[in-house]
């Protein structure tokens, strides 16, 4: 009996040791990679915003989760907010840019799983262009035929982003 | 050296983990919508496979028999997390497009199968070679499937337009249904080759037996 | 959170975002243990049981252990350990107290640890930021979708044993092609909205 208990103890200890070593290795990798990862997130976000505004060297200040004030050299350029809409195959995440008077100046898609060649037509730049100059809350953009659900998802995403921006600014 | 080459051939062709052993179906079906994703997934799995094979082979005398599967899973999941962290730091766009399938490498049967069947019984060096050959076999199968799906499903390769503009892509190949269909036909082709090889071998055997029998009979009559 | 939103979440997890036909989670048991409707149902029930419980367990581990300690990056390691331990525990529990269910599910239980549907549902619950009730409902519904897919598929396959396909297609290739046709049928559910 005593031997049995001892062997269980040894087995447990060995397993614990393996777990500890693995956790240690993973933690080490985590500390090394955390900074470049955060930098990646920042640069992806910045790229999306900069393509919308069409210029570089912008300063982003986070007002709320995924809602940003966009400035250049201290002058207010506009706002940016992330929104989510339900498309044909799940969520469409997008970034919407606004000018100072809260008119949409551009939409860019962050992630989607729409059907390539069918629904994805509603995510192309030529279609997203139509949101330019619209109000985000009630954009007057027709759905693409054959890609109704995806178009609807984009519209819902833009509306969601606008609502978040309004909430963040407290207006 | 000759042994290693034999092992490599085993993993890439004769005993290909995906096309012959039919292991690791989830990532094979899910990440082959584009060649880039397929290579990313294949190489990430290969990295985990090499590391876990080496580690488990080194620890094969240390790991207690009763809890070996649990120990393997801990080691594998550790390496998978490390690979995930490295990918999101240095290959961010690939990390985003593979999504949940990177952590799911943990439950890829290929890795656990090689740990149990090979690494736990062999020295570190052959285990590494086994990891390389099986990993590359997996990558090869994924790349093959992805090439077919991307080329005909969206007319591109590595994201570049390859097919002429007049080509109307067969969208279904990119959809989930297309994954099942393409893999089904691909494995059918592999089976066809294997059947042919088997038939040839059997035919040769029968011939040899017959020749042998006639030779014997001849001897008998002569005697 | 209303009853309606829970219903919506479950409906979408069962049909629209079916684990097998649109996400490819859990394809190994789907293709491996689907030769007979009875065994498929057994596997489905075992998965449903484990996935519901593990959904709750991993949610608790994440929100009460990993998140407060800022160890979110260890979630894959932690979840697979929780699932493996849970499967072991459920096996012992059923063996001791519900022998009938144990003998029905017995052989499928150990296979579930390496079923990627279970791990992916745990990871998805965290990723989508579900609360506790949603986590349980999602785990249950996704597993139900898995069960439905595997039972339907086994029904088709048991009929197919009578067919005489070309030799190269015998076995696995034909199974995959059948799955492809079923996936096409299931793709009709995508886009269903309320």
Image: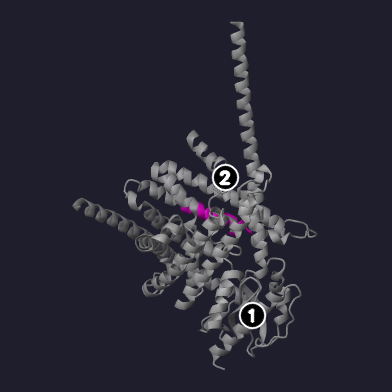
Q: Is residue A60 left or right of residue B80?
A: right
Rendered location of residue A97, percent (x, y): 63, 82
Against C23, residue C138 (above or below) is below
Asked whether the viewer can see residue C160, the reply is yes
Residue B61 higher or lower than C118, as above or below: above
Q: Mark 1 against mark 2, which lies toward the viewer? A: 1
Q: What x and y, as percent, mark residue A52? A: 64, 78
Q: Residue B159 at x, y = what percent?
A: 67, 60
> What chain is tagged by disc 2?
B
Residue B39 vertical placement versus A71 (above, below): above
Q: Quadrant where the C terminus of chain C lies?
A: bottom right
Magenta extent: B30-48
- As measured in the structure, the alpha-carbon distance from the residue carrying label 1 to the one carrying label 2 is 44 Å
Task: Give me the disc on residue C194.
Answer: 1
Instruction: Answer few, some or many: residues within 10 Å of disc 2's Cα (few below 14, many 20 plus, some between 14 and 19).
Output: some
**Residue for point 39% across, 42% down:** B121
Q: Is residue B38 magenta?
A: yes
Left or right: A126, with B86 as reference point: right
Q: Which residue is mark 2?
A: B20
């Amino acid at each position: 009996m005593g031997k049995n208990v001892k062997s269980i103890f040894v087995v447990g200890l060995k397993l614990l040791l393996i777990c500890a070593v693995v956790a240690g290795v993973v933690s080490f990798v985590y500390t090394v990679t955390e900074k470049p990862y955060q930098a990646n997130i920042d640069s992806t976000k910045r790229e999306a915003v900069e393509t919308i505004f069409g210029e570089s060297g912008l300063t982003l200040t986070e007002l709320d989760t995924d809602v940003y004030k966009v400035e250049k050299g201290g002058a207010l350029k506009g706002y940016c907010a992330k929104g989510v809409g339900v498309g044909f195959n799940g969520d469409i995440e997008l970034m919407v840019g606004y000018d100072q008077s809260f008119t949409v100046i551009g939409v860019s898609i962050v992630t989607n799983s729409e059907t390539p060649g069918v629904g994805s037509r509603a995510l192309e730049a030529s279609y997203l262009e139509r949101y330019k100059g619209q109000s985000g809350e009630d954009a007057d953009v027709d759905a693409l035929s054959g890609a109704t659900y995806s178009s609807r998802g984009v519209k819902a995403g833009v509306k969601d982003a606008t609502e978040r921006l309004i909430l963040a600014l407290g207006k | 050296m000759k042994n290693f080459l034999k092992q490599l051939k085993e993993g890439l062709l004769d005993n290909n983990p995906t096309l012959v052993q039919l292991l690791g179906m989830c990532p094979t079906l899910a990440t082959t919508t584009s060649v880039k994703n397929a290579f990313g997934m294949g190489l990430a799995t290969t990295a985990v496979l090499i590391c876990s094979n080496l580690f488990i082979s080194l620890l094969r005398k240390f790991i207690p028999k009763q809890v070996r599967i649990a120990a393997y899973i801990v080691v594998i999941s550790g390496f998978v997390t490390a690979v995930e962290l490295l990918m999101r730091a240095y290959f961010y766009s690939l990390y985003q497009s593979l999504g949940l399938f990177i952590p799911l490498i943990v439950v890829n049967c290929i890795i656990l199968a090689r740990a149990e069947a090979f690494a736990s019984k062999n020295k570190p060096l052959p285990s590494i070679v086994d990891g390389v050959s099986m990993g590359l076999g997996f990558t090869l199968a994924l790349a093959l499937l992805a090439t077919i799906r991307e080329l005909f499903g969206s007319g591109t390769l590595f994201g570049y337009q390859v097919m002429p503009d007049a080509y109307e892509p067969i969208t279904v190949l990119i959809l989930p249904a297309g994954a099942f269909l393409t893999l089904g036909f691909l494995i059918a082709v592999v089976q066809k080759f294997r059947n042919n090889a088997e038939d040839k071998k059997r035919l040769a055997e029968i011939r040899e037996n017959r020749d042998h029998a006639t030779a014997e009979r001849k001897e008998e009559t002569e005697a | 959170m209303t009853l309606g939103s829970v219903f919506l979440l479950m409906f979408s997890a069962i049909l629209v975002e079916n684990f097998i036909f649109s996400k490819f989670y859990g394809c190994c048991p789907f293709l491996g243990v689907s030769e007979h409707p009875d065994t498929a149902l057994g596997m489905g029930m075992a998965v449903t049981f484990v996935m519901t419980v593990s959904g709750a367990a991993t949610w608790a581990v994440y929100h009460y252990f990993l998140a407060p300690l800022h160890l979110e990056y260890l979630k894959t390691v932690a979840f697979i350990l929780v699932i493996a331990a849970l499967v072991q525990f459920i096996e012992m529990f059923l063996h001791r107290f519900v022998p009938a269910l144990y003998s029905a599910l017995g052989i499928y239980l150990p296979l579930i640890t390496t079923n990627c549907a279970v791990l992916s549902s745990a990871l998805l619950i965290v990723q989508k930021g579900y609360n506790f009730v949603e986590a349980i409902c999602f785990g249950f519904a996704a597993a139900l979708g898995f069960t439905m897919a595997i039972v339907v598929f086994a029904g088709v396959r048991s009929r197919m044993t009578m067919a005489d396909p070309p030799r190269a297609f015998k076995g696995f290739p034909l199974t995959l092609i059948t799955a492809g046709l079923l996936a096409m049928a299931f793709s009709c559910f995508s886009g269903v909205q309320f």
